[in-house]
Image: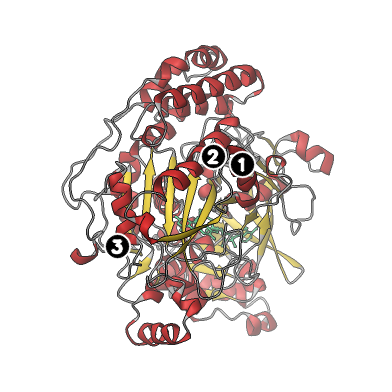
Amino acid sequence: MTVLSFRSVLWSCLGVSFLKLAHARLEERGIVTSPEAFEAMNFDFVIVGGGTAGLTVAARLAEEEGWTVGVIEAGQYRPNDAIIDVPKNFGTAVGNANYDWIYTTVPQTNLNGKQVRHPRGKVLGGSSAINFEIFNRPAKGEFSGWSALNLGLGSWSWSGLLPYFKKSETYKPPRPEDVFPLASTTRRRAFQRRQNTTEAADAFFTAADSALGPTALNVDDLLAAASDGSDTVSKRDDAYHGSSGPVHASHNEWYSDLANPYILSMNNLGVSTNFNPDSGDNVGIYNTPASVDRDAGVRSYAAPAYYAPNAGKTNFLVLTGAQATKINWKSSDDNGLAVAESVSFVVNGVSYSAKASKEVILSGGVFNTPQLLELSGVGNPSILNPLGITTKINLPGVGENLQDHPYVSLSFTVKPGYHTWDELRNNATFAAQAAAQYAATKDGILASNVGVLSFFPLQSFLSTSKILSIVSTLVSDLVSSTSSMSLLRIAQSVLQLAWLSNQSIPQVEIVMIPGFNPTGTVTAPAAGTNYMILTAALQHPFSRGTVHITSTDPLTKPAIDPKYLSNAFDKTVLLEAVKYIRNTIATSAPISNFIATFNDPPASSTSDAQYEDYMKVALESLKHPVGTSALAPKELGGVVSPQLLVHGSKNIRVVDAGIFPMHISAHAQCTTYAIGEKAADIIKASW
Ligand SMILES: Cc1cc2nc3c(=O)[nH]c(=O)nc-3n(C[C@H](O)[C@H](O)[C@H](O)COP(=O)(O)OP(=O)(O)OC[C@H]3O[C@@H](n4cnc5c(N)ncnc54)[C@H](O)[C@@H]3O)c2cc1C
């Protein structure tokens, strides 16, 4: 359809009622405030969720002039909002209902019943508007695992995703003076100790081979994928970064006084500085890019990146303040595939529906997409039947396979006289000067965020005998539970076990936060005190959780159960990482010279039992839940095909972080944008 004919349809629809027309403010910037006007449209694509991936795929589909794209977003459009825009304000939207869905988990059995907070963005731009702005990429070998699970179909490998990482970003390299000053420039391989943990895992591989027997997957192929280092691209300087994409990525220009000594301590411990972490080799300590438009000094997120530049387009409309409640069906096609024809949504308690002549795209995120699928009859009949929901597609994988990065933070008080973020809290004059600087030049401490990350395998901080003992317990657990595991989980466990010997697949991330951070810290900050926080996060937990509806009321939150630390491997590795921070990093010069006291846990905590007790109180989510609409074959328990179509449907796709079939050693947004970009090309090629 041409833009002209689209406009005529638009106006004839609006002409149905003069009253409706009066209310139908198709405002400048493409935001529709009238649900009646939105309902009157005939969209080609209806996208549920104007978040990170949703706006990405919407904007790219709207590049096709003949296609009409309608986005239903529960939150509001909030341009020029300092809570979102000022980089250092990251975290302040969490818990505020104007920005956040404010989810919490069900009580966690292994955390003494603790309910873990799970913020999710409820605003145009979704979680990209409220996240902590870290903008990094995983190890390329992790995508070999995604690819292997999907039998190589759809190119979900590193080389199949790299073009989309690049397409989504405009990358600004660090200024020469900001590249980890004082850090070693010698690229040393950090981890010399090697052992073959796959031999110890043989008992499980045998059990897995027999369980996977009837499927097209086999253990040999999975093991080959787990050690795959061949998926490379040319190493030209610009081979990895994009220069004209919608999301701006840049590096800090303000660093705390803790950055250099901390980096040096890590270098001294054998953790090398990695100067090209976006290359698919992310092991080491590095200066992470952030989703910050450095020239403007503001957060770069999906709304300004993908929506605002296209807001004038008449074929790209966004309805805010509207929550999608159900997919509506027409008769199945000749192949028995379910066909969606519209999406119901509710605004201020009134129900409407939006017509989709081509596709319904679900981009509501890792919790809300499975919720909408289940409300629409797509899922496990044993969950749907008791609620009186008729099963339209029997798909037991919906809402399963929830994976997250659990973390534990340790805080240390810092000796007086060093610059950290705490000065903004402790020193009113400094805070006023920082605000004035930011207002004038959009830089300085208020334009900064977390800059220093490190990722490493177990071999970097555990002895060979400790690793083999961890693997041996893990293998026994897996062998004894193989018969109750889904095939997807069995295949994932083969990959994850093999990754334990592949030292280019990080298992732990440690984040250095230069100042008190309310998330994940137990004790409130003392007046006039500065802090350093070191956070250990598991990258590839073996625990798996779920998200499922408990009611047919679409406004009732689903039950989120990550089952944190339900696998002994997760608890042991997190405990060892906590001990590594406390006993090794914090006691290594030069950073040890900056530390005044051990704060959380206190100096009196020294035993494993005390650390475990602390972990149960302090454990939080790094806010990277993924996997609940897994990209994997239906026979394994997956939810979407390599084309991102919901198995058993003709025209429903999922495009959000829920499709990650396995977790990655990176924060989730970069990969989620890449998924949105790739999805758009898949969809364009299919019509
Ligand atoms: C507090 C926080 C900090 C984080 N920090 C980082 C970080 O530093 N770096 C990083 O890489 N990642 C980070 N993440 C994770 C990352 O931001 C997310 O994984 C990613 O943005 C998810 O994208 P998505 O498209 O799957 O979902 P979202 O971006 O959350 O988008 C979903 C959208 O759908 C809307 N929606 C949902 N249901 C409905 C419905 N029924 N009807 C209408 N609209 C609906 C939501 O309101 C939302 O706008 C963080 C996340 C949070 C919450």
Q: Is residue 154 visible?
A: no
Q: Are marks 2 and 1 in contact (CB under 8 Å)?
A: yes
Above/below status of 411 relative to 147 = below
Q: Quadrant of residue 567?
A: top right
The quadrant of the rendering that contains the N terminus is: bottom left
Disc ID at residue 575: 2
The local secondary structure at tag 3 comes to strand
Disc ID at residue 170: 3
Tag 1: residue type? Glu
- x and y percent of residue 363 in the render? 55, 54
The earlier-in-sequence mark between 2 and 1 is 2
Identity of the residue furthest to the left in this view: 236
Tag 2: residue type? Leu
Disc ID at residue 656: none
- x and y percent of residue 188 in the render? 22, 40
Above/below status of 38 relative to 541 = below
Report, in whole angstroms, how far the alpha carbon at label 2 lies from the one at label 3: 38 Å
Tag 3: residue type? Thr
